[in-house]
Image (tube, rainbow, N blue to C red):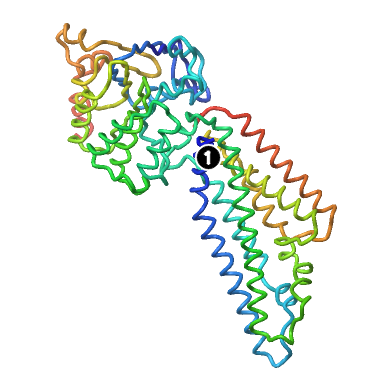
């Protein structure tokens, strides 16, 4: 068991600071953008702004998407052969086969994405608190934030409440992207650049907030990311030598 | 015994190795010499199974594979360690994955080179990284230690001292295959010289044979490579003529 933990820890170490940094950066940028909009609205003589309008008009999804792509790119770079070293020559010789290592790393990467989403859901809750503190109790009621997490596409995708299909989509997406990132690194060590694997991250960042409330959309996306997971597993299983 | 039988390897139609056959008994220190692109690195990578090849490579009568791969270690100028880990973390990691890990040798060599134990390897100088790479190859408890240009970037004093230490610490069952351009430096240290040129073995002589013939390693290499002593003067005179 320890040998599996040790190779898993390699990936975790490669990810943890990047995950922390990007999670914080994303949360700060989102908070900053929200704060600027809220402040501008509060200066106007009209009644306090509705948080749903504020968020729907904001660039929260864009900020989230960019940070998400950066995180996915960071995951793809764990274990790459580069100037700093060729760790694949060691991974190849360990007691745990490199294929198993790649699958364990995929689990770490998927967990990193889920943590990122969870942290962004938490950041969204903090934005709600910030809003409540600034606008006063007359601008919202008990249902405001609950409804907000149903109606705002990004927030609902981050915290889908009782929409099981979106939870499923998110888990399939994390699994698919985790395996794609790991397969990218695995194949790069063999001199092959897997551009489709890189493209999955961009696609996921783009579609993440879309299709809320659509069971069919979520099922379709789940299938697409399970397909990505399957392709990546096949590419890892296929293996091959260090030809470059 | 490590037996390399009729090994051929080509990259996109260009032959890197052509029918290379070589036997490395246990307890030898073998120098592998050749010009840039001669096939030294390719040969080592084939032995480790990092590259696909035609032919046969047997370790104690069995093909090299996952079962016996830990009996081979590899020190490469490309560096096979994990840049984010410190030396002590590498020690713990390698000790878990290579049961024959030599803790005492690791500590001794770390002290000899004066390398820091708790600093991430990405912060080491190139020379220190090379030293650490060699330490890990020697400390894994492998019977066959393959070293590919391990001291590029190290100063001459470090290299000379290291060869002396290496001669002292190697045990009778350990074999070293050392690829380097530094013929004169390793002349006193190796027991056998194998010359490779354009993917073919062009010379193979033991130190005793050379001594009995009254020849130095450098003379042997020059002879095998058909080195023309007059090529410099000829080139200079041609250049002078062109200048006139």
Chain of the residue where label 1 is placed in the rendered structure: A
Q: In front: A129, or A208?
A: A129
Q: Looking at the picture, how far across and down is residue B6, in whole percent?
A: 45, 10
Residue A29's place in the image compared with B100, above or below, is: below
Judged from the image, the secondary structure of the residue bearing numbered disc 1 is: helix
In this rendering, position of residue A231 left or right of residue A143 = left
The image quadrant that residue B82 belongs to is top left
Q: Looking at the picture, how far across and down is residue A236, in whole percent?
A: 61, 34
Residue B115's place in the image compared with B209, above or below, is: below
In this rendering, position of residue B88 left or right of residue A112 = left
Residue B179's place in the image compared with A171, above or below, is: above
Location of the N terminus of chain B (image quadrant): top left
Location of the C terminus of chain B (image quadrant): top left
The image quadrant that residue B159 belongs to is top left
| Residue placed furthest toward the front | A1
Q: Which residue is drawn at 21% across and 12% down?
A: B207
| Residue placed furthest toward the bottom | A45
Q: Looking at the picture, how far across and down is residue A204, in whole percent?
A: 69, 53
Q: In front: B50, or A173?
A: A173
Residue B176's place in the image compared with B4, above or below, is: below
Q: Looking at the picture, how far across and down is residue A221, in whole percent?
A: 77, 50
**Number of labelled discs?**
1
Q: Which residue is drawn at 61% across and 70% down?
A: A30
Residue B230 visible at all: no
Q: Residue at x 54, y 36 (%)?
A: A4
Q: How crowded is mark 1: few (under 14 residues within 10 Å), some or many (20 or more)?
A: few
Badge 1 is on which residue?
A: A5
Residue A161 visible at all: yes
Q: In front: B204, or B140?
A: B140
In this rendering, position of residue A117 left or right of residue A16 = right
């Amino acid at each position: 068991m320890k040998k599996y933990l040790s190779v898993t820890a390699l990936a975790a170490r490669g990810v943890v600071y990047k995950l922390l940094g990007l999670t914080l950066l994303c949360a700060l940028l989102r908070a900053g953008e929200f704060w600027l909009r809220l402040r501008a609205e509060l200066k106007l003589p009209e009644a306090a702004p509705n948080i749903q309008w504020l968020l729907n008009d904001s660039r929260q999804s864009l900020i989230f998407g960019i940070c998400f792509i950066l995180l996915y790119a960071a995951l793809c770079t764990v274990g790459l052969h580069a100037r700093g070293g060729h760790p694949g020559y060691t991974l190849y010789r360990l007691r745990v086969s490199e294929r198993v290592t790649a699958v364990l790393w995929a689990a770490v990467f998927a967990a990193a994405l889920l943590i990122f989403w969870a942290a962004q859901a938490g950041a969204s809750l903090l934005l709600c608190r910030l809003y409540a503190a600034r606008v006063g109790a007359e601008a919202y009621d008990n249902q405001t934030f609950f409804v907000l997490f149903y109606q705002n596409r990004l927030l609902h995708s981050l915290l889908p409440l009782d929409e099981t299909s979106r939870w499923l989509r998110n888990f399939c997406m994390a699994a698919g992207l985790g395996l794609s990132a790991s397969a990218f690194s695995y194949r790069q060590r063999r001199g092959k650049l897997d551009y489709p694997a890189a493209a999955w991250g961009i696609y996921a960042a783009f579609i993440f907030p879309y299709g809320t409330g659509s069971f069919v959309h979520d099922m379709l996306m789940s299938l697409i990311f399970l397909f990505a997971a399957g392709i990546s597993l096949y590419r890892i299983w296929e293996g091959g030598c260090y030809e470059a | 015994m490590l037996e390399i039988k009729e090994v051929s390897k080509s990259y996109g139609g260009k032959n890197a190795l052509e029918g290379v056959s070589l036997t490395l008994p246990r307890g030898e220190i073998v120098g592998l010499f050749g010009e840039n692109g001669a096939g030294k690195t390719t040969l080592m990578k084939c032995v480790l199974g990092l590259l696909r090849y035609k032919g046969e490579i047997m370790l104690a009568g069995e093909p090299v594979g996952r079962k016996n791969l830990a009996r081979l270690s590899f020190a490469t100028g490309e560096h096979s360690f994990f840049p984010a880990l410190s030396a002590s973390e590498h020690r713990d990691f390698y000790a878990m994955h290579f049961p024959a890990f030599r803790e005492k040798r690791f500590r001794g060599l770390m002290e000899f080179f004066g390398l820091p134990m708790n600093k991430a390897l990405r912060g080491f100088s190139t020379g220190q990284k090379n030293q650490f790479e060699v330490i890990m190859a020697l400390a894994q408890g492998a019977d066959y230690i393959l070293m590919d240009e391990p001291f590029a970037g190290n100063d001459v004093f470090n290299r000379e001292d290291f060869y002396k230490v290496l001669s002292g610490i190697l045990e009778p069952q350990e074999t070293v295959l050392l690829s380097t351009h530094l013929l004169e430096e390793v002349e006193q240290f190796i027991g056998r010289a194998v010359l490779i040129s354009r993917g073919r073995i062009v010379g193979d002589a033991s130190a005793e044979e050379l001594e009995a013939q009254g020849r130095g390693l450098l003379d042997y290499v020059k002879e095998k490579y058909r080195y023309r002593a007059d090529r410099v003067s000829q080139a200079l005179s041609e250049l002078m003529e062109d200048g006139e």
